[in-house]
Image (cartoon, grey):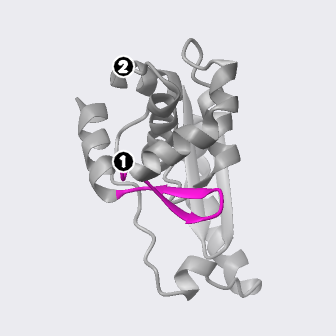
Amino acid sequence: MESRIRIKVGSLEIEYEGSEEFIREKLLALFTDVAELSKELAIAPDAEEQAGNVVAPPSGKGISLTATAIATRLGVKSGPDLAKAAAAYLAIVQGTPSFTRKQLLETMKTATGYYKETFRGNLTHSLGTLVKKMVFNETTKDTYTLRAEPRKTLEKQLAD
């Protein structure tokens, strides 16, 4: 069985996807090594931590779906729908607090059966629509977050 884990200490982030056996047998050693490495390198907190912002862990615990599965559960029919599904994947499943336009587009492309090349050309419009509908916040140019209320709604839909 294949598993995934991501460890973040300050600005150091390690992501592993592979055998569950490795995680069971070597996880403690990996945590220890990462902790020692962060002390040795004196890893500074990342920019959000320095600014005093608390980065919330993904609250969709236990939700392990692909972008395609999320698109299916949400009944995606349009570009903005698929962008919202991709954002749900990034924010809820991956635990990414903010995402770029590029990350969103790449995730949309992984939703096989839903992604159409026209969505790429209309992405600016789709993102604008989602910002106006208060689904996304644009934190900086071409960087977005999923707003709290839509996120809660999506988590409920995906947990069912």
| Label 2 crowd bin: few (<14), some (14–19), many (20+), radius 10 Å | few
The stretch drawn in magenta includes residue 141: yes
Q: Is residue 24 visible?
A: no
Residue 100 to residue 75: above or below: below
**Three-letter code for the amino acid on which mark 1 is drawn:** Lys
State the SS at label 2.
loop
Q: In this view, does 57 lie to the left or right of 5?
A: left
Mark linked to residue 75: 2
Point out residue 27 in the picture as x, y percentages from the top left corner: 57, 54
> Considering the numbered disc 1 on the image, is that residue within a helix, a strand or a loop?
loop
Quarter-wise, where is residue 140 in the image? bottom right
Q: Which of 14 and 158 is in front in this view?
A: 158
Please name the amino acid that badge 2 sits on: Gly
State the quadrant of the N terminus: top right
Mark before the other along the chain sequence, 1 or 2: 2
Q: Residues within 10 Å of mark 1 (few under 14, many from 20)?
A: few
Mark number displayed over residue 156: none
The residue nearer to you, when weighing 18 against 79, is 79
Secondary structure predominantly adopted by residues drawn in magenta: strand
Residue indicated by mark 1 = 133
Q: Residue at x 57, y 40 (%)?
A: 125
Residue 151 place in picture, x, y as percent: 33, 49
Q: Does the magenta stretch include residue 77?
A: no
Alpha carbon distance from label 1 to label 2? 18 Å
Extent of the magenta region: 134-147
